[in-house]
Amino acid sequence: MKLAIRTLALVCAFLLTACATNPAGRNTLNMIPASQVNQMGLAAFAEYKTKKRVANAPREQAYVECVSRNLIAQLPDQQRSLPWETVLFDDETPNAFALPGGKIGVHTGLLAVAQSEDQLASVIGHEIAHVWYGHGGERVSQQFAAQAASAAVNAYAGSRQDGNSQQVVALLGLGAQVGVLLPFSRKHETEADVAGARLMAEAGYAPGEAVALWENMARAGGPNVPTFLSSHPNNRQRIEGLQRMQDELSQIAAVAQAAGRPKRCR
Ligand SMILES: [Zn+2]
């Protein structure tokens, strides 16, 4: 038992040194260096590309890349300089994701739900914000911490906790796509909504279209909730939150538009 307590103390000491502050000013747990989380994201994306069909649609591919580029241009230096890549996948489910390291995936099915360039920008902006705020890495850290703590507590009994790589991929943000449903927490969703909507407005896109997009998304599901909403819960609160931000966002967008943004993609 002494050993378990000592292990637990070590874990706790380690956790204390692993705290950081994210761009929203919230204290977060970061047990894994960002460079390593990025590597995990790149590996997950490379694997996803071998399993899913990349869309053979050059115009649409150019379109999603162009919208991503307009948004990425407004990120802080450190984030903007990531090797961003946007890939359109041939999949009818209305879905999109972004992984640490700067990899964005958009399903062809999303283009039917996001009825304007501005609506598409609101989804991609939201996904980029998850990466910008380090949500994937934070989720992996939380999972490791929980496993380490429970491993320490169970050490005496000799129980083992093995990592699950598919779960790690899901934690990074590929949840619904790999069939493991791990919805982002309400805290992460709210942060991504706020940061994503500001990013979209700074790129000159019409902020009201973010509200329209989420309403479309809810309608598109009919009785079946679209996969994207399952991994991005709290739709009603999300819409209300975005509505409350509209005045602020409109002012940001007006400044951006006066400066000639966005360069339209369609
Ligand atoms: Zn989200």
Image (cartoon, grey):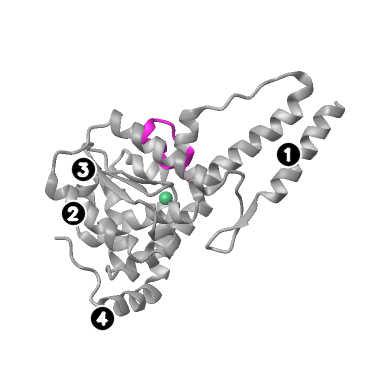
Residue at the image point whose x is 40% and y is 76% from the top: 248
Image: 236 above or below 158:
below
The residue type indicated by label 1 comes to: Val
For disc 2, the marked residue is: 63
Residue at the image point whose x is 18% and y is 39% from the top: 55
For marks 2 and 3, give the one nearer the viewer: 2
The segment highlighted magenta reads 171-184
Label placed on residue 258: 4
Mark 1 and mark 3 lie on one chain; the one further toward the N terminus is: 1
For disc 3, the marked residue is: 108
**Residue 151 location in percent, x, y?**
70, 28
Distance, label 4 to label 3, CA atoms, is 32 Å
Q: Circle 4 sits in a helix, a strand or a loop, which is it?
A: helix
Image: 141 above or below 147:
below
> Residue 78, located in which quarter of the rendered image?
bottom left
Distance, label 2 to label 1, CA atoms, is 47 Å
> Residue 95, located in which quarter of the rendered image?
top left
Distance, label 4 to label 2, CA atoms, is 23 Å
The residue type indicated by label 4 comes to: Ala
